[in-house]
Amino acid sequence: MKRKRIVIILGVLILLIIIILISQRERVFYRIPFLAPEENVKLVRLYFASPDADYLKVEARRILREKRITDEAKVLVKELINGPRENLDPTIPPETQLRELYIVPEEKCAYLDFNQAFQTNHPGGSAGELLTIYSLVNTLIDNLEGIERVQILVEGKTIETLAGHIDITRPLPRDSTIVEY
Amino acid sequence: MVKKILIGLMVTALITLVALPLLAQQEEIRVIYDEGQAQATIKSLTFQGTNFIYLKEMVNLFRLDLEWEAITKKVILTSGPDQVIFFVGSSQIMVNDRIKKIIQPPRFSNGAIVLPVEFLSEILDGVLKAKIDWDPKTRILKVSGGRLNVREVRHSSYLDSTRIVIDLLKPLNYRVRKDLPAQVTIDIYDGECNPDQLSLEINDGRVKNIQAFQLPNATQIVIKLPKDLPYKDFTLKNPDRIILDINPPQKRLGYKITTIVIDPGHGGKDPGAIGRGGTREKDVVLAIAKELKNLVSERLGIRVVLTRTGDYFVPLRERTAMANNEKANLFISIHANAALGRARGEGFETYYHSLALTKEAKAVARFENSAIKLEKGSEEPMDQAEFILWDMAHNTYLNESSELAILVQEELSKKLKIRNRKVGQAHFYVLSGADMPSILVEVAFISNPREENMLRNPDFQKRVAEGLYNAIVVYKRSYERSMGLVGAD
């Protein structure tokens, strides 16, 4: 009888640990080298906003390596949407969804197609727009081999600006003037 | 008995959960110069409990000269008159002919040479005359008083002028003199540099070469020209730099400011940014624009056209077209700023146009070569032809626009008690295609509750308008005087 109770408690405990591990999967999994074989992990540089919205700053993060560059690009964008873990600020409205992502190798260009929320929920402002645009552009160009330009689309279409300031009608190259290392 | 096992198990589980993140291998070290004047991040590795950094990154970070003899595994680092010699695998380090020892020797890691962090605080601090503190807990490397505060000299050759940019680690006093024919000398007081790295051969028809010299208490930059040419100097911030334009574009003759187009951002279906208290950008910028219009037309007698006079939508392209059709001499777009996150953005900033395609090539600014070497070099210089074409199209008003932007920041800082952020350059839709000097000013952060309150306040709006008005007055005076339209006063 007593033994049965202990087995139940033990079972609950193990279950609890598993639940905690799963809920923290992202944090734990990506940060601990021995949970994922090293060759499956890639250290990437994500650009987020400095707390005073002055610059983009780098946050290093581990992601699982993907076989296709398009999949890896999608992971990068999703990590940016998820936002920073360290003392930095997000650059993309949390409601944003990546609808599709294409890479055209001949153009060395990545096309990112977002849902309407990306534009509608954007706070606006030149500072905010620059941070959003170049956190995407710089992150993709820095971490992916063969990408030199990034074109931002909303609901499948090119748009003049995200919120009335920066021209995003064409693919953009990397900008390091907005980055503080 | 079973209870004990249970408790043991629980404790183990807890410890594992807590300790897991701690086991994670950290891979970056933050470098902070002079109390946060500048920052950098470098990679680090751990061997036997000691942190190592890459020799290459250290050389870039501190602007050292590096020589490497592969056969003997000898490394020679030079900084000005000082020399550090060591062999990979040996913990004896020769510093200016004296031998010092460090605990962990430099070693190889995947073919790259890595050095223990102690190398910086034990060896390099003396050579650089800098104070280098390494805090293993926070993984922060503090560098203060490093002598290389004159970091880099670079140049861009335009069609008719040459721009020389001297990157500084912090603002330094300087003097430009012209004592000898065909030569301009800049003395940077308290400047310290590595002269070999700053000297440049240019030979673009206006500048022959640039030579740097290190004097006991100043850095001297000597610019040799083929013949005497006019020049102009000024400073820019973020990062701090001295700009010297050789043969700067002459201000256009017959340039008189008779019409100004003021563009209150957004409007109608586009409210612009909205503050937490519900303040709408389109309303406050319209109020400021109207105020500015009154000041300019009443006090200067200049014709002022607003791109919108009420709460209705005007497409960006039409705003620029309006300025071109009105043959405006200045175009000023007024906005309120915003950013995501904890709304800590604060202050005012002014932008002028740059083509995104050329920005990277033009702005080699911000410690590109120092801190970080990305895994792949994505910073290819722009195609020369592309650059020249762009310059022909846009450089005509770029200088005027940057001058106006600098003036606006200066005059606003006299009127407003909020942070003076920066003059920036970006590819603005509303500024592209404007056939006149044009700027876009973000007067405060509406996403910051404190500044949202200010923006709503008519007194604040008035002070913004006055600041902008004063900038226009100074700009107008400087232009019209330089053409002899106004007597010297």
Image (cartoon, coloured by chain):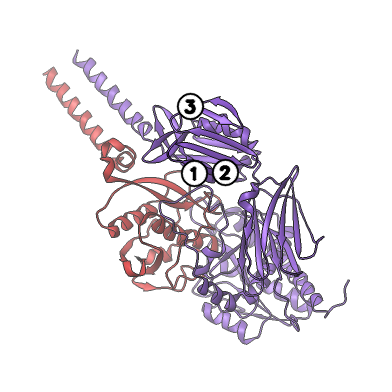
Chain colours: A red, B purple
Report how far apart the C-alphas of labels 3 and 1 lie in the structure. Answer: 20 Å
Give coordinates of residue B161: x percent, y percent. 67, 71
Image quarter where the N terminus of chain A lies is top left
Q: Name the residue under label 3.
A: B91
- Marking on residue B64: 2
Residue located at (60% from left, 30% from top): B97
* Chain where mark 3 sits: B
The kind of secondary structure element at disc 2 is loop
- For marks 1 and 2, the one nearer the N-term is 1
Mark 3: which amino acid? Ser
Mark 2: which amino acid? Leu
Residue B291 against residue B86 in the figure, above or below: below
The kind of secondary structure element at disc 3 is loop
Give coordinates of residue B179: x percent, y percent. 82, 60
- Marking on residue B32: none
Single out the residue that lies furthest toward the front.
Answer: B71
- For marks 3 and 1, the one nearer the N-term is 1
Front in this rendered view, residue B425 or B399? B399
* Chain where mark 2 sits: B
The kind of secondary structure element at disc 1 is helix
